[in-house]
Image: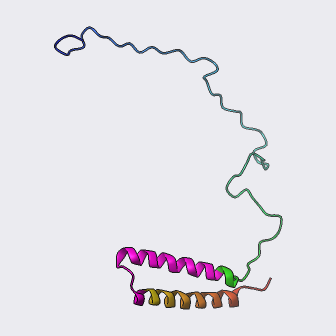
């Protein structure tokens, strides 16, 4: 570099190597049996269970865990927006309990026996 800060004397030359046959990625030829099922791994929609899938009524344990998750989510969001109070917590618990009971009752009544 010269005294005035210019780069007249310095030259940068980029050097590179030509690609070799090992650097080239070749695409595999598609197989003739594309219509048949392949065992190449998990593909969306490719798993089919051997047994028939039948609807079942929700269990009380699962329903309780879903209701608990909904309560905690609503309370966490309410705490960030307006802050928690005893009245708000009670209102959320009652509202979620009533909604859960109604939904559970409807699903138990409308689910066919298996």
Is 74 placed above or below 43 here?
Answer: below
Image coloring type: rainbow
Placement of the N terminus among the 4 image quadrants: top left
Placement of the C terminus among the 4 image quadrants: bottom right
The reply to whether the magenta stretch includes residue 98 is: no
Toward the front, the furthest residue is 86
Asked whether 38 or 89 is in front, the reply is 89
In this rendering, position of residue 17 left or right of residue 54: left
Instruction: Place residue 100 in its image quadrant.
Output: bottom right
Question: How many numbered discs?
Answer: 0
Is 54 placed above or below 17 here?
Answer: below
In this rendering, position of residue 49 left or right of residue 91: right
Instruction: Place residue 84 in its image quadrant.
Output: bottom left
The residue drawn where x is 41% and y is 15% is 14
> Could you say where residue 23 lies in the image, as x and y percent from the top left?
60, 22
The residue drawn where x is 40% and y is 77% is 79
Boundaries of the magenta span: 63-88
The residue drawn where x is 52% and y is 15% is 17
> Could you say where residue 37 lies in the image, as x and y percent from the top left?
78, 50
């Amino acid at each position: 570099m010269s005294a005035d800060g210019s780069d007249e004397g310095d030259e940068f030359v980029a050097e590179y190597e030509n690609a070799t046959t090992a650097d080239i990625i070749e695409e595999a030829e598609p197989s003739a049996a594309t219509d048949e099922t392949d065992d190449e791994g998990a593909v969306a929609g490719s798993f089919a269970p051997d047994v028939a899938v039948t609807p079942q009524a929700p269990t009380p344990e699962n329903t309780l865990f879903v209701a608990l998750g909904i309560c905690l989510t609503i309370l966490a969001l309410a705490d960030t927006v307006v802050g928690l109070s005893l009245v708000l917590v009670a209102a959320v618990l009652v509202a979620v309990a009533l909604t859960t009971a109604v939904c559970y009752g409807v699903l138990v009544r409308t689910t066919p026996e298996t």
